[in-house]
Image: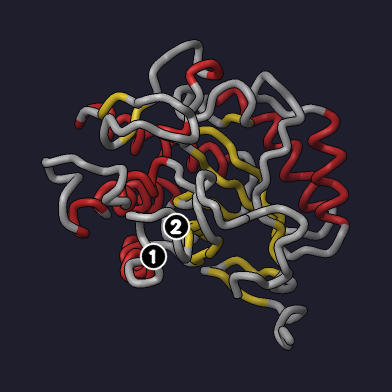
């Protein structure tokens, strides 16, 4: 069915032994944002399993966007442990990618010290069951710089590629969605304005990591949420990502609040192919 699956591929300047990519999955093996022995053992086996790419994530770029349970790369202090992890993945024969994460309105207040999550607009989130505060222009710049700084730390830690999550209903998709983005400034309204925030995030990350590091974005082929983006808009979004500097477009389906299943075992293989 997939005749090229075991063929090598070059992504930007990165040579990968096959087309098998292990995606980022929230494991919740710690509650302090740090790696531990269980994480190391888990990713050692993933790398030994034969995948060309093993992706670590989601990894938070700041506290308000990820909270207590997700791994973090919000400061330099996290680099040594992540360097140990990339060494483990490389020893297993795989390339190491990291997925950078900000939940936006999906952040649960209980996980961010009771703070109010921030998002494009103050629209109630049925997932976190809270109404976020609308991001100021200063917030937007701060988060974009945090993505870029996190990407630079990832490269320093030995990751071969950086992935930005723009799926599942998280912050970048919230800006893209007319359902959740009700801004009236340059970051809301028509498609060009709604796509400005994710485009600028990618551009800033690309500038920070340079032209030669593999850069990926994980997007939904369809949000599967009434009133949000569908198959009609997603090719346009993908073009924005490509023009902004990504090398790989990693496609999944749906938001966490979607009624369409994303991860359960009963989901058929290749369901979204």
Q: Quadrant of residue 142?
A: top left
Image quadrant holding the N terminus, namely: bottom right
Judge whether residue 200 can be spotted in this image.
Answer: no
Q: Quadrant of residue 137?
A: top left
The residue identified by callout 2 is: 223
Around disc 2, counting alpha carbons within 10 Å, would you say few (fewer than 14), some (14 to 19), or many (20 or more)?
many
Image quadrant holding the C terminus, namely: bottom right
Q: Position of residue 126 (x, y in %)?
A: 45, 35
What element does badge 1 sit on? loop
What element does badge 2 sit on? loop
Whether residues under marks 2 and 1 lie with C-beta atoms below 8 angstroms apart, the answer is yes
Using residue 181 as the reference point, say whether residue 102 is left or right of it: right
| 38 w.r.t. 244: above or below | above
Depth check: give the residue in front, 58 or 204. 58
Q: Residue at x 71, y 31 (%)?
A: 28
Q: Residue at x 72, y 53 (%)?
A: 264
* First along the sequence among labels 2 and 1: 2
Q: Which mark is residue 118?
A: none
Q: Which mark is residue 230?
A: 1
Q: Residue furthest left?
A: 185
Q: CA distance from mark 2 to mark 1?
A: 6 Å
Judge whether residue 187 can be spotted in this image.
Answer: yes
């Amino acid at each position: 069915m997939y005749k090229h699956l075991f063929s090598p591929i070059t992504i930007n300047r990165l040579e990968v032994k096959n087309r098998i990519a292990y995606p980022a999955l929230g494991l919740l093996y710690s509650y302090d944002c740090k790696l531990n022995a269980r994480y190391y053992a888990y990713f050692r086996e993933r790398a030994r399993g034969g995948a060309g790419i093993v992706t670590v994530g989601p990894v938070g770029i700041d506290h308000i966007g990820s909270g207590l349970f997700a791994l973090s790369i919000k400061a330099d202090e996290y680099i040594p442990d992540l360097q140990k992890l990339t060494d483990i993945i490389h020893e297993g024969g795989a390339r190491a990618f990291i997925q950078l994460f900000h939940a936006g309105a999906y952040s649960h207040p209980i996980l961010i010290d009771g703070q109010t999550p921030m998002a494009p607009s103050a629209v109630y989130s049925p997932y976190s069951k809270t109404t976020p505060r609308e991001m100021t222009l200063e917030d937007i710049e701060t988060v974009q710089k945090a993505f870029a700084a996190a990407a630079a730390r990832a490269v320093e830690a030995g990751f071969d590629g950086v992935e930005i999550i723009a799926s599942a209903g998280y912050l970048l998709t919230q800006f893209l969605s007319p359902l959740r983005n009700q801004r009236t400034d340059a970051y809301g309204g028509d498609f060009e304005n709604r796509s400005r925030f994710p485009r600028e995030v990618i551009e800033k990350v690309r500038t920070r990591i340079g032209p030669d590091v593999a850069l990926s974005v994980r997007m939904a082929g369809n949000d599967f949420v009434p009133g949000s983006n569908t198959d009609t808009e997603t090719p346009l979004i993908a073009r924005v990502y490509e023009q902004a500097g990504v090398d790989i477009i990693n496609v999944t389906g749906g938001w966490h609040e979607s009624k369409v299943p994303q991860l359960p075992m009963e989901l058929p293989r290749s369901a979204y192919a």
